[in-house]
């Protein structure tokens, strides 16, 4: 099973991707997490990505496609996968289609929808783990120990691009570049819409039902 989680910044893709992948017994990847790992290690790709991410812009397609396709084409992903944050341009979607053309293609695209005003509130209260990148929220999903990740004990911090100006830019980029992908996948009969404005548990159950259907 090959699944894409689509949705605006703050929709809950990162919150849901791990449990959905576990449910499907497949691997998963978040393109933003891959870029942040490179940034932390100060690799050439990380330095380049940082210059775009910090201001809420997309990293150029050529480097993004290369990075994610390396992951998609690895033998570990043969059983399937869940993608979070990729594709988010038409160029990325067509590159993915080409890469999977002989493997059966994408099975489902789950589109998590949340009103814009709620996205802004969520992102302003988000903290993520410096080690494993698990997201928390000062309002809805606090860690058991303040400032520490429940899963790995890592330190929690606020993403640079969760500051108000970068959030505004990310939402604008999403509307212009990524939202059109909903129609792209809808026209292929792959899109399933999910109300993301419910508890984390309820959204998780809805996603699990859709991949079972
Ligand atoms: P990326 O890391 O992918 O960020 P994003 O798409 O903007 O999405 P977010 O991670 O902000 O939101 P999310 O949907 O994962 O929400 P989360 O689960 O954390 O990308 C960052 C940057 O990297 C991009 O701007 C770009 O520069 C670059 N990049 C990445 N991929 C790229 C690509 N393909 N092409 C080009 N550039 C790329 O939840 C948000 C908050 O809400 C959390 O605090 C969480 O606890 C809370 N929450 C979650 N669910 C609920 C719920 N049901 N109710 C209440 N609160 C909830
Ligand atoms: Mg995320």
Image (tube, rainbow, N blue to C red):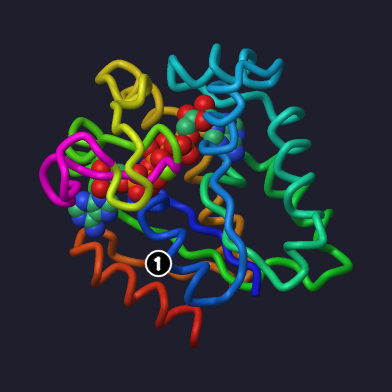
**Residue pointed to by mark 1:** 193
Q: Is residue 99 left or right of residue 77?
A: right
Q: Nearer the viewer, residue 114 or 201?
A: 201
Most distant residue in the front direction: 153
Determine if residue 175 is in view. Answer: no
- Establish if 13 lies above or below 89: below
Horizontally, residue 213 falls left or right of residue 49, namely left
199 or 28, which is in the foreground?
28
Q: Residue at x 84, y 63 (%)?
A: 101
Residue 179 position in % (x across, y down)? 47, 45
**Quarter-wise, where is residue 89 in the image?**
top right
Location of the N terminus (image quadrant): bottom right
Q: Is residue 139 above or below residue 166?
A: below
Per the picture, the main secondary structure of the magenta-coloured stretch is: loop
Q: Is residue 201 above or below residue 100?
A: below
Q: Which residues are magenta?
A: 132-148
Percent x, y of residue 82: 57, 62
Queried whether the magenta region covers residue 138, the answer comes back as yes
Residue 44 falls left or right of residue 200: right
Looking at the rendered structure, the secondary structure element under dot 1 is strand
- The quarter of the picture where residue 125 lies is top left
Q: Which of the 4 image quarters holds residue 88?
A: top right
- Spot occupied by residue 24 in the image (x, y as percentages of width and height): 54, 76
For the point 45% across and 43% down, the residue is 132
Which residue is nearer to you in this view: 35 or 155? 155
Can residue 155 be seen at all in this image of the molecule?
yes
């Amino acid at each position: 099973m090959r699944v894409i989680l689509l949705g605006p910044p703050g929709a809950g893709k990162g919150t849901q991707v791990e449990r959905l992948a576990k449910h499907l017994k497949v691997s998963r990847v978040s393109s933003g997490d891959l870029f942040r790992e490179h940034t932390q290690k100060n690799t050439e790709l990380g330095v380049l990505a940082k210059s775009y991410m910090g201001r809420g812009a997309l990293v150029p397609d050529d480097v993004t496609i290369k990075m994610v396709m390396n992951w998609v084409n690895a033998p570990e992903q043969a059983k399937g996968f869940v993608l979070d944050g990729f594709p988010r341009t038409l160029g990325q979607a067509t590159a993915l289609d080409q890469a999977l053309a002989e493997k059966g293609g994408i099975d489902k695209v789950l589109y998590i929808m949340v009103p814009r005003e709620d996205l802004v509130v969520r992102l302003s209260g988000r903290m993520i783990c410096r080690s494993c990148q698990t997201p928390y929220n000062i309002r809805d999903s606090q860690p058991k120990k303040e400032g520490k990740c429940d899963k790995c004990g890592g330190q929690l911090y606020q993403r640079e691009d969760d500051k108000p100006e970068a959030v505004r830019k990310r939402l604008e980029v999403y509307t212009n570049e990524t939202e059109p992908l909903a129609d792209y996948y809808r026209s292929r009969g792959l899109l399933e819409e999910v109300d993301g404005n419910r508890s984390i548990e309820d959204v998780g159950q809805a996603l699990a039902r859709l991949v079972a259907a």
